[in-house]
Amino acid sequence: MEILKREMYLSRIRPFYRSDLIKILVGMRRCGKSTILKQIMQELRDSHVDEEHILYLNFEMIKYRDLQDAVSLERYISDRIGDNGAYFLFFDEIQKVDDFEDAINSLRVSYDCSIFITGSNEKLLSSELKTELTGRYVEFRIQPFTYREVTLLKELNGQQVDEKTFEDYLKWGGLPQRFFFERDMDISTYLSDVYDSIVSKDIMQRFNIKNPEILIRIVDYLIDNSSRLFSVNNVVEYLKVNKMPKSTETVYNYVAYAISSLVVDKVRRFDTKGKKILASTEKYYCTDPGLRNTRSVDSGSDIGVNLELVVYNELVARGYKVVVGITPRSEIDFIVERNGKKAYVQVTYMMGEEKTREREFGSLLTIQDNHPKYVLSMDRFDMSCQGVVHLNLVDWLLGNTKGSQDFESI
């Protein structure tokens, strides 16, 4: 299978190829970070950078097992820098190296080099790292394939794109390697293996979890309840019902561990009237619909949840900051912001019934400001009204909404 060039991310990273700012690529395990690094390396070769000036280390490989601390890593790289020319250093899954930020900082100040690092947990986003590298890094969040990327991948490999393509994406998501498998059974097995790897390596091993069964239950609960309001007390009660009692503090810690693995995102709720973040409850969204559907007990029963999940991850991939909105009478699925501009977004399956239209449009019409407002659904007929723009959800995912008020202008 031909490998898709991920231009969505490369176009953002390219301006920094020769910058001394540290380039941080962060995303869940198996979302495609390593492939993007290799595509950057190839573009450097194509621009006539000497192969000896490109150093790539993947810390999941046994050959680099001895480089598990900052001193060893810094010494290893220093021994391979042979002249005064510019070097390009690529460190894949660097969170496995103790105090890696010390090595990165030392290399940055000692040599003419451009440094790229990736990682699969929030250690790369920690306050300690940001303090150590304040003003010296740029961060790129990498997501699994968007739906548009899936269609481009299929076209690249001479495969047909039709309605079943979206159904498949809604069910199995966009983790790049899952497209090497054709049978549902094989895809499900692969996604289960990815999930097990995330839980075991990015959570259990890192945080030395003593009771893995409870951790798995909590992560499953978060994934299964994607897009629904979350309460720690509900999880505590859920564990009690399943005869696995745990304290509220433990549940909070385990939820934080799940977030650190980037398999789920926590999305805060914003009071549009009081203009403040609500701290009591949040929503959680699984980073990939395929993982959710592999772990969820009712994955196929609520298409609305899966659509909302797809839209959330698309917004993140496009670089929006996202919160959930609360009005005095209802909820706004997403309030998004990018480049200082804001918009409101509702997501629903179909709007054939009048009460559905009243609910989706009514929530947006209660907001008295001039920021753009959108409803995304699977309907083909344009139902825009009173300044609220209705877009077909699949067309929006594909970027085929030019001519109406352009979402991407935000």
Image (cartoon, rainbow, N blue to C red):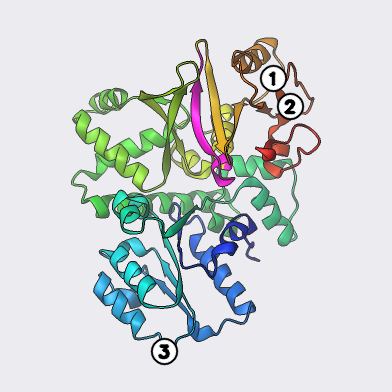
Along the line of sight, which residue is nearer the eye, 382 or 114?
114
Coordinates of residue 62 in the picture (x, y in percent) = 33, 74
* Residue bounds of the magenta highlight: 314-327
The quadrant where residue 282 appears: top left
- Distance between mark 1 and mark 3 Cα atoms: 65 Å
Coordinates of residue 203 in the picture (x, y in percent) = 30, 50
Does 296 sit left or right of 373 as displayed? Answer: left
The quadrant where residue 71 appears: bottom left
Looking at the image, can residue 239 be seen?
A: yes
In magenta stretch: residue 329: no
Q: Nearer the viewer, mark 1 or mark 3?
A: 3
- Residue 351 - label: 1
Residue density around tag 2, few if under 14, some if 14–19, many if 20 or more, within 10 Å = some
Q: Secondary structure at mark 1?
A: loop
Mark 3 is on which residue type? Gly
Does 47 sit left or right of 189 as displayed? Answer: right
- Residue 253 - label: none
What residue sits 27% from the left and 39% below the top?
Answer: 254
Mark 3 lies on residue: 82
Q: Secondary structure at mark 3?
A: loop
Does 272 sit left or right of 255 as displayed? Answer: right
What residue sits 73% from the left and 16% below the top?
Answer: 386
- Distance between mark 3 and mark 2 Cα atoms: 61 Å
- Distance between mark 2 and mark 1 Cα atoms: 7 Å
Query: Is 146 rendered above or below residue 25?
Result: above
Mark 2 is on which residue type? Asp
Q: Tell which circle, 2 or 1, labels the residue nearer the N-terminal end.
A: 1
Q: Tell which circle, 1 or 3, labels the residue nearer the N-terminal end.
A: 3
Residue density around tag 1, few if under 14, some if 14–19, many if 20 or more, within 10 Å = some
Mark 1 is on which residue type? Met
